[in-house]
Amino acid sequence: MDQSSWQNLGENIRLICGDVDGVVGNTGSQRRFHYGCLIPQFDKYLSLLFALEFGKNGRI
């Protein structure tokens, strides 16, 4: 996020960024398909995000 955007939104957002391995494409079974991404340990990243105070950022 660029500095001007962070200054405008800084007190209203929480942000984590970084690189993780994941899968993008079709997943599912014969009865149900989903196209999207799967990020292993996504709950861990959400926990990191929710632990931040508004106006803060972190890296994964």
Image: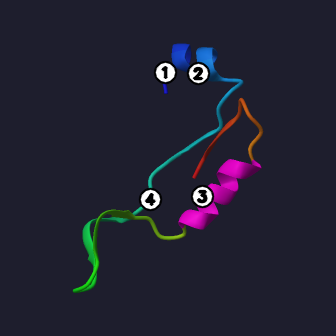
> In the image, what residue occupies the spot 62% across and 64% down?
44
From the image, state whether disc 4 or disc 2 is nearer to you.
2
Give the amino acid type for the residue marked by disc 4 in the picture.
Val
Q: Which residues are magenta?
A: 42-51
Residue 2's disc number: 1
Is 25 situated above or below 52? below
Q: Earlier in the sequence, mark 2 or mark 3?
A: 2
Give the amino acid type for the residue marked by disc 3 in the picture.
Tyr
Name the residue beneath numbered marker 4: 20
| SS for dot 1 | loop
Give the amino acid type for the residue marked by disc 1 in the picture.
Asp
| SS for dot 2 | helix
Q: Earlier in the sequence, mark 3 or mark 1?
A: 1
| SS for dot 3 | helix
Q: Earlier in the sequence, mark 4 or mark 1?
A: 1
How far separated are the C-alphas under marks 4 and 1? Answer: 21 Å
Give coordinates of residue 13: x percent, y percent.
65, 32
Is 11 situated above or below 28? above
Left or right: residue 23 versus residue 20 is left
Looking at the image, what colour scheme do you see? rainbow
> In the image, what residue occupies the spot 66% across and 23% down?
10
How far separated are the C-alphas under marks 1 and 2? Answer: 6 Å
Q: Are marks 4 and 1 in contact (CB under 8 Å)?
A: no
Magenta stretch prevailing secondary structure: helix
Name the residue beneath numbered marker 2: 6
Residue 45's disc number: 3
Say whether residue 45 is magenta: yes
